[in-house]
Image (cartoon, rainbow, N blue to C red):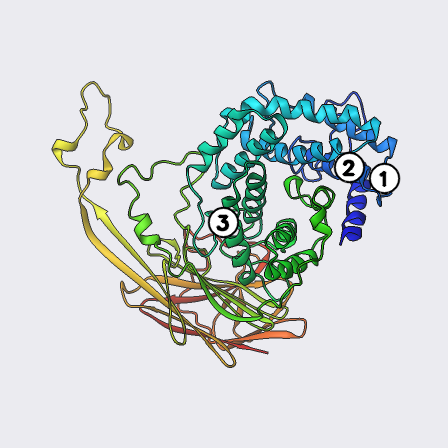
Amino acid sequence: MFKRISAINDKWTDESLQRQITDRSNRYFGGVRDPYTGVAWPSHTGTAQFIAVWAASLVNPVSQYHLDIALLEKLQEAMDFMLRFQHEDGTISPGWTNYHSPPDTAFVVVGLANVLTLLEQQTWEPLAAVTEQIRLFLQRTVPAMLTGGVHTPNHRWVLTAALGSLYRIFALEGLKQRAEKWLQEGMDITPDGEWTERSNGIYNTVSDIMLYYAAQDLERPELLEPVRRNLRMMKYLVHPDGEVVTDYSGRQDFGSVFSLADYYLCYKLMAEHDRDPEFAALAELAGSAVTHPGSLPNNIMLGFLLYPQMQAAAVQPEELPVDYRKVINGAFNREELLGKIGQDGYGGPVRHSKQHTEFGAPVARIRSGATSATVMTEASSHFSLRHGKARLLGVQLASSFEPGLITMQSLEETASGFRLSSTAEKGYYGPVPGDKLPSLSGLSASPWYLLPHGERPLTHSQPSKVTVQVTDHSGGWDVHFAQQAPSDVLTQIVLLFGKEGGLEGTGIVPVPEMRDTSFWASGTIRYTAGEDWMELEQGAHEHELADIRGMTYPDGCLKVIVTLITPLDYTLRIRLS
């Protein structure tokens, strides 16, 4: 693996050098041009990322760039760029989001602190100047790390790791004390190992590796326990082809393709730390998907060069499960925790982020060989299915009641499968009681926005409950939808298929105003990808509304719409090749 990562790191070095801005009249001189925006940024996915890649190539004995003076000059130019784009308060701005950002700076701190440690271990004298540049950059970040705040849950652990990294280098007690203030908030992870953001593609790996570093630098071994939980959970959240389940993510990896590659560094380090055969097996699986060195804090090449145990093979991997039925967070006390919002000082507004009330929502994972299914709550889809290369990316439910998407709120495991349910209530609101009205004295009008709408009494409330029964059988799956009241609600089931496959069926009618979208009016349809297929029955077309108000239809997939009117008693049957 070391030789493979070295070759990948050299390739990235070569490619990124071609994107470095070499025009000295350009204000971004020395930075590495971002391929998406065309601008060089000082972020952990921008120029700072490639500083780690280049530094690793320089000191790696098997690299073609080992002790290459020309590369060293480019590295110094990149660090000049970083120092110029570091604000007076010690922070950096990624440019495409967040300005004077402590958490984005913390990402860079953790990575460059590792680069600094690596360079200080070397005896090659020409490295001295760039080593001092990195040390200066890190020293300038100390005030921001001592005072800076966050937006998102994982940012707390990024800042904690950055504070630990700086404490390792500068030994300032205040850094450790600030880290303790973040840690006293407690870990936002369920007993089954799920972090707040439910981000299996991106932010799990951030929280995991950051807490590994924090445990090391702050001498807090108990911080490895949540890391273990998440790493163990992930063995149930990988499809047979190695793709990670992102169907219910609360962040930008939602519905995108990710592998376990970014978990490799943490899996390997934890496998050796715990002498754990399961982690060793998952490290092998993650390693097989690696195609790049990793973002700055997760840089695998740095990991190999900093941690000798990365090249050890003391732990023999065990077999990973390929047949299972697992409910994640099934016993989590989510309703009790949600009930505390607004009580006893719990809860409150979350600015520039969100409350993530979906935290701890149950998810079921079922795998049988090459077939993989996910049953989800608090997500835009409640069922997804992979069968070989055939991908049913999601099954969505929408109606004109709210109107828009219906998310499932509860999941119950049954003998034959899983029962999902969602309850909503919609009513009308009477006049504000006179004693609750604000004073209109001196006002030229009574704006709607000044009225205390929370004081209006509810009238004519209508409840709506939908249940979805998901059942697996020898030939495939049944998904049954039921709703009794209110009647005459326009409803639709939206089936999302991978665009790499094709659909066949006489009952498919294209929807002209919606791209890659069809009504499924009747009969059976077959979706085929490669040699694998799914056959679905029975189509229905009870109304003509394709685009329900409040509903968002994703791009990049084939969409098939079944239109129904309540009361519902409809079964979608799926047969597999």
Please tell me whether mark 3 or mark 2 is closer to you in this view: 3
Q: Nearer the viewer, mark 1 or mark 3?
A: 3
Q: Nearer the viewer, residue 45 or 133?
A: 133
- Image vertical order of residue 76 relative to residue 475, above or below: above
Question: What residue appears at the point 31 percent right and 69 percent down from the top-left corner?
Answer: 567
| SS for callout 2 | helix
Q: What residue is pinned by disc 2?
A: 54
- What number is the disc on residue 82? none
Residue 52: percent from left, percent from top: 72, 37
Q: How many numbered discs sit on the rendered protein?
A: 3
Question: What SS does tag 1 mark?
Answer: loop
Sequence order check: which comes first, mark 2 or mark 1? 2
Location of mark 1 (residue): 65
Question: In the image, is residue 235 above or below residue 341?
Answer: below
Front in this rendered view, residue 150 or 167? 167
In the displayed image of the protein, which residue is found farthest to the bottom?
474
* Above or below: residue 423 compared with residue 158: below
Q: Residue furthest left?
A: 435
Residue 30: tell me if it is visible.
no
Q: Which residue is mark 3?
A: 226
Q: Amino acid at mark 3?
A: Pro
- Separation of marks 1 and 3 at Cα, in angstroms: 38 Å
Q: Give the percent coordinates (x, y) of residue 92.
A: 61, 27
